[in-house]
Each structure stands twice: as structure tokens, then as C-alpha cells.
Amino acid sequence: MTLGKASAFAASLLAVFALGIWVGPHVVHRSAPPSTEVASTDEAPAPAAPARTKATTPAETAAADEGPMTTNVPVSTPELHARLKPLMNYGTNMTLAADGFADAGEFAAVAHAAHNTTVPFVVLKHRVLDEKKTLAAAIHEFKPDLDAKLEARRAWIEARADLAGLEG
């Protein structure tokens, strides 16, 4: 191959690469593909997740201190999974995500904290379950620039709201 042909070949590769970078974002549709899960006909549709709100009063903040909640909702409840699924990454197996949590409140709080802080769920789950750290300590370890205690309280408030809708 001559120098001219090699130069032309390299220039064409560079042009194709540049064209791909320029056109790529306009061609790729970035939304998640439709779910492939098959719903049973005897199940009721999952209720919509409640709107997330922040604690606005000191009483709400004090009531949401980090810690386990007493709840009658099992971790494996399909309704709980339906409420928490939108907080997880696309394609998350909710049974595997809930595995290891003895308390539905703790599972919901870790899921909300992961969603709110963009800390990966598996990281928070590992730190809380395996390393026995508090949710605030786990958040602080991954994102020290955040107010970890505030984020943990917020997650517990949201978890309590999710569970209150299921217990009633």
C-alpha cells in the first residue's frame, strides 16, 4: 500500500468516527425498552408510588430518626417491590435486591437513599447489611460532600410513607 492510499484510508476512518460521534446522539433512543415481564391476569395492578416529599417540620424530622421500624410488611411483598422498583436501575431483580434484608423498612430506606443520593444500591446494601453500618455512615463514606444524616432521615421518611400505604 502506498503512502497516499494509507493516508486516504486513515482520513476516511477518522471521518467515519467523527460522523458517528456527531450523529450518534440523534440516532440512539435512550429510553428503556418495554418491560418483558408477563403480568398474571388474577393480580391487581400495582398502586402508583406516592409522591416523594421532604421533612418540613422538626417533628417530622425527629420522628424519622434513622433506625429500624416495626412493620407487618414482609420484605418479599409484591406490593412493596412494585413501589420500590421505580427507584432501582432498569432490569433490577427485586427478589435479589430484597435478599438479606430482615426488615421491609430498612430495604425501602436503602432503596430511597440510593435513588436520592445516586449512590449505587448494592454499595449501600453491602455497607448496611454486611458491614453493619448505619445508613448515614454508608452514605457519608461514599459521598462525604453530602449531609448524610439529612439524606438518611429523608430516606427513612420516604420508606415510612411507602410502608404506611401497604399496612393500612
Image (cartoon, grey):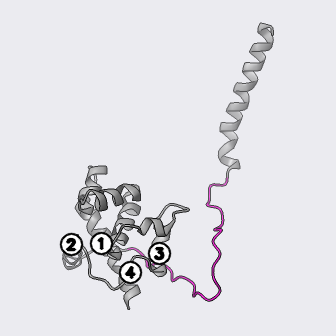
Q: Residues under labels 1 and 2: Cα distance? A: 8 Å
Mark before the other along the chain sequence, 1 or 2: 2
Measuring from the top left, give residue 15's x and y in whole percent: 72, 28
Magenta includes 147?
Answer: no
Mark before the other along the chain sequence, 4 or 3: 4
Magenta includes 42?
Answer: yes
Residue bounds of the magenta highlight: 29-52
Amino acid type, label 3: His
Crowding at dot 3, Cα within 10 Å, few <14 / some 14-19 / many 20+, comes out as many
Mark before the other along the chain sequence, 1 or 4: 4
User: Would residue 70 appear left or right of 34 to someone viewing this image?
Assistant: left
Crowding at dot 2, Cα within 10 Å, few <14 / some 14-19 / many 20+, comes out as some
Mark before the other along the chain sequence, 4 or 2: 2
> On screen, 55 above or below 128?
below
Q: Residue at x 23, y 57 (%)?
A: 137
Occupied quadrant, residue 90: bottom right
The residue indicated by pointer 4 is 74
Measuring from the top left, give residue 72's x and y in whole percent: 33, 86
Asked if the residue under mark 2 is in contact with the one under mark 1, i.e. CB atoms within 8 Å, the reply is yes
Q: Residues under labels 1 and 3: Cα distance? A: 17 Å
Query: Marks 1 and 4: which is nearer the front?
Result: 4
Q: Residue at x 30, y 58 (%)?
A: 130
Mark before the other along the chain sequence, 2 or 3: 2
Q: Residue at x 57, y 88 (%)?
A: 44
Amino acid type, label 4: Pro
Measuring from the top left, give residue 75's x and y in whole percent: 39, 76
Would you say the magenta stretch is mainly helix, strand or loop?
loop
> On screen, 95 above or below 2?
below
Query: Marks 2 and 3: which is nearer the front?
Result: 3
Task: Evaluate whether residue 99 shows in this view.
Answer: yes
The residue indicated by pointer 1 is 156
The residue indicated by pointer 2 is 65
